[in-house]
Image (cartoon, rainbow, N blue to C red):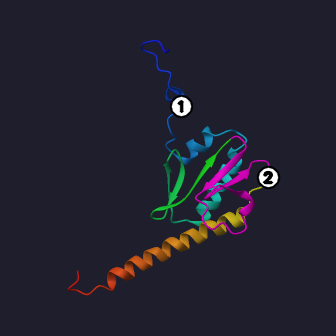
């Protein structure tokens, strides 16, 4: 039984979430940091119009809604949500996560292609929404 006035919750030992991508990467295991920096650069190159911010305690990119996130761990870095990850199937973990071991080179060309495909999906959604609004008659507005 816990003593009065003392919390036994694990939340008291957790660090507050990082405020920036740089701070997030710096707080990750040293071995994962180079991969996280490369992953960040690849995403920024493939989606230059995306907004970078901390969301769910990890680094996320929004274009204008959720595009991708990345996170670090002791033995891998992860990219979420993976979506249709052609050519990256061997890294798939679960329904929509890609895990890249830190002892292997990142498949940067394939990661960039995945991010570019997600940007194209968002652009197509935006065009569809805009066309749907423009197609309404003046009396329907």
Residue at mark 2: 104
Residue extending farthest left: 139
How many numbered marks does the figure carry?
2
Q: Quadrant of residue 83?
A: bottom right
Q: Is residue 30 left or right of residue 57?
A: right
The residue that appears at 50% across and 21% down in the rendered structure is 8
Q: Secondary structure at mark 2?
A: loop
Does 83 lie within the magenta span? yes
Residue 139: x, y in percent? 20, 86
Q: Which mark is residue 14?
A: 1
Residue 41: image quadrant is bottom right
- Could you say which quadrant of the image residue 136 lies in? bottom left
Q: Position of residue 100 (x, y in %)?
A: 72, 53
On the picture, is 90 further left or further right than 1? right
Q: Taking 26 as reference, is 91 above or below it?
A: below
> Which contiguous range is marked in magenta?
74-103
Between residues 62 and 22, which one lies in front from this camera angle?
Answer: 62
- Label 1 Cα neighbours within 10 Å, binned few <14 / some 14-19 / many ≥20: few
Q: CA distance from mark 2 to mark 1?
A: 29 Å
Q: Badge 2: how crowded within 10 Å, few (<14), some, or many (20+)?
A: few
Secondary structure beneath dot 1 equals loop
């Amino acid at each position: 039984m816990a003593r009065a006035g003392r919390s036994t919750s694990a939340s008291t030992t957790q660090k507050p979430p990082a405020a920036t991508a740089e701070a997030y990467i710096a707080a990750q295991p040293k071995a994962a940091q180079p991969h996280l920096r490369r992953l960040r650069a690849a995403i920024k190159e493939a989606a230059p119009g995306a907004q970078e911010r901390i969301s769910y305690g990890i680094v996320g990119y929004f274009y204008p809604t959720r595009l991708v996130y990345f996170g670090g761990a002791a033995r891998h870095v992860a990219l979420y949500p993976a979506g249709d990850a052609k050519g990256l199937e061997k890294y798939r973990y679960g329904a929509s996560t890609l895990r890249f071991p830190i002892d292997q080179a990142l498949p940067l060309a394939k990661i960039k292609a995945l991010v570019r495909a997600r940007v194209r999906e968002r652009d197509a959604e935006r065009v569809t929404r805009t066309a749907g609004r423009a197609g309404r008659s003046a009396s329907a507005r």
